[in-house]
Amino acid sequence: MFRKVLIANRGEIAVRVVRACHEMGIAAVAVYSDADRDSLHVPFADYAYRIGPAPSRESYLCVDKILAVARQAGCDAVHPGYGFLAENADFAEACADMGLVFIGPSPLAMRKLGSKTAARRVASDAGVPTVPGTLDPIEDLARARSLASEIGFPLLLKAVAGGGGKGMRAIARESDLEGGWRDAQAEAANAFGDGRLYVEKLLRDPRHIEMQILGDWEGRLVHLGERECSVQRRHQKVLEEAPSPVVDRALREAMGEAALRVARAGGYHNAGTVEFLVDAERRFYFLEVNTRLQVEHPVTEAVTSLDLVKLQIRIAAGERLPLRQEDVAVRGHAIECRIYAEDPENHFFPSPGKILALRLPEGPGIRNDVGVAALWTVPPDYDPILGKLIAWGADREEARARLGRALEEYAVVGIKTNLGMFRRLVRDPEFARAAAHTAWLDDWLRRSGTSSPSPSPAAPEEENAAALVAALWATASAVPRASAPVAPSPWKLQGRADELDNQPRRGR
């Protein structure tokens, strides 16, 4: 087993990996940018190193700096989390060249399955149905026009290296194609450094359902059931659940076998996700492979009682997969909300700033994966996710009720969040009936008047929660402080300087 793991990430996922390492007796090494000096993952880790200014291209995306830290700290392995360098085959290869174990799939598997067009080709060759469209990137707009006439409208322009809805445009008619092409290409180039696009037929109101897979170095592969990810805003997932309320045993087995066929064809090991679209006739189509841990992995952990991060680490260390397909059992239901620092009443613009007070919900079946704390300042430089709220119940209705109760308890003072949107959403009768599809949330937001530039009055429960936490904060602030100076903690003294050091943050 590894002695020391570097976490090449930040925020809630870095905290999640640190915790898994500590439970396994592994020392955790954090990296941080100037914007993240006071981030929660820094004091949680055993060692922490500054890697540069706030812009990610000068810090979290800088391979040389991260590898220099790994060398300086004497690490055995690197966990990439998700985002940043998590699906960068060159980074995985550079780790291997330095003698570090990359906790994820091989660079070859990442190249075969990480590119959306390459993965579509692998799936097609494996006999897995794909959404009608191109298997190769499109050279130019003229070729896109030609393909559009063959496939027919509506269609999707999608980034070859895409994710999170970036570099994606829905094209309803030919007159929209040129502008959509230009916008999608520019957004993809800016987000991924790769402006190549491909074309896919736009399915009407499909569901987005994904299968979690695990594989070891000896070729053993299992799937852990599905996650429903259809509640999306502009192609970005915001709420996920497991299992899907519309997938029966036969469909689960068929999609699971299809996912494993794709994984075997790609030579995949470690944790990954094979994503599908399911139409109204319950036909499924391969969409893409995410060659990393997913943001929504906690709902799978909740219903399977498996720790996916620990399994990632054990597999990367050469251990055999400890379960067979028949050992996988799903118990109960789990739903996750992604809590963002954003203003739903103003086009979901990011809401960076200082968190004056924070109250996290607790109680039966509730889990919080967070990377923030009170008095921390949310920087404007990164994805504004604050954390994830996960509710588990014996069935979907209990999970939904617990989630609703937890959302009422959740309070963040000082910045805008999407908590109010989720409070309304989980009470909606259509959500209760599991009627969501990939365009449902955008339509629901339009119908509810959310995302208008003029803010609407806060719901009473939001005002009450904010007032309560503000009052608690004011009371705590009024408590007299001791006049004697308080010694700074060791982690603040060690590692705040620009020079790298390898002194432990705390004894272990």
Image (spheres, rainbow, N blue to C red):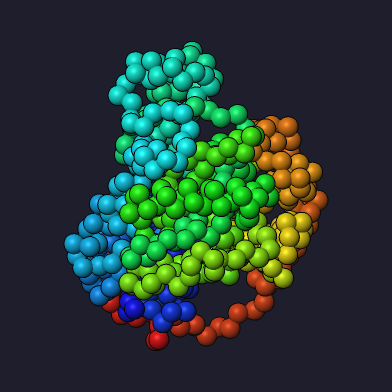
Q: Is residue 135 or residue 406 the one in the foreground? A: 135
Q: Is residue 152 left or right of residue 142?
A: right
Residue 255 position in % (x across, y down): 53, 48
Q: Residue at x 67, y 72 (%)?
A: 476
Q: Residue at x 76, y 45 (%)?
A: 433
Q: Is residue 325 or residue 213 the one in the foreground? A: 325
Residue with the most extreme left position: 97
**Res 149 → quadrant:** top left
* Quarter of the image that includes the N terminus: bottom left
Q: Is residue 176 left or right of residue 341?
A: left
Residue 251 position in % (x across, y down): 60, 47
**Res 145 → quadrant:** top left
> Can you say whether 80 is above or below 55 in the image?
below
**Residue 319 seen anywhere in this rendered image of the structure:** yes
Q: Is residue 355 left or right of residue 503?
A: right
Q: Is residue 303 or residue 44 the one in the foreground? A: 303
